[in-house]
Image: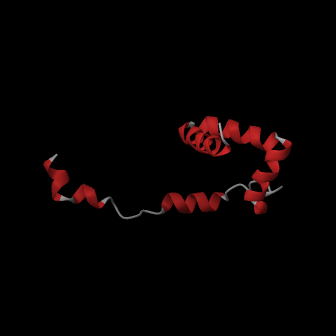
Amino acid sequence: MTAAYEYQDMHHLVDRLTPAQVRRLYLLVTRDEELSQVAQSMHPADAGASEEPVPAGLLALIGSVNGPGNPAERSPQSARG
């Protein structure tokens, strides 16, 4: 199998993974000495940074915002149901 096929197969494999499987694969990649360097180079700003908690005030603000309703709910086609 050539590298081009392996590359393509790897893309298809990752596309078929569940979110939990992607997290496991990412964990394996970040623990590998060589592959972790590639992973870190993709997100240099995140290297060594821990996630900051979302301020409670921001969550309250987001929860209080009432956006426009779904226009499809008011359409004549949805009334035919």
Q: Quadrant of the C terminus?
A: top left
Residue 44 falls left or right of residue 67:
right
| Relative height, residue 7 to residue 53 (above, below) | above
Frontmost residue, 36 versus 58: 36
What x and y, as percent, mark residue 37? 82, 51
- Most foreground residue, 41 or 19: 41
Q: How many marks?
A: 0
Hey, which quadrant is residue 74 in on the image? bottom left
Q: Quadrant of the N terminus?
A: top right
Residue 7, position in %: x, y? Answer: 64, 45
Residue at figure coordinates x 51%, y 57% from the top left: 63
- Colour logic: secondary structure
Locate residue 72 relative to residue 29 in the image: left or right: left
Residue 2 in which image quadrant: top right
- Identify whether 7 is placed above or below 40: above
Residue furthest to the left in view is 80
Would you place residue 38 above or below residue 62 in this image? above
**Horizontal side of residue 79 vs 23, given as left or right:** left
Q: Residue furthest front?
A: 2
Q: Position of residue 73 (x, y in %)?
A: 25, 55
The residue located at (63%, 61%) in the rendering is: 57
Pinpoint residue 31: horizontal percent, then vertical percent: 82, 40
Instruction: In this rendered view, identify the residue nearer to me: 5 or 20.
Output: 5
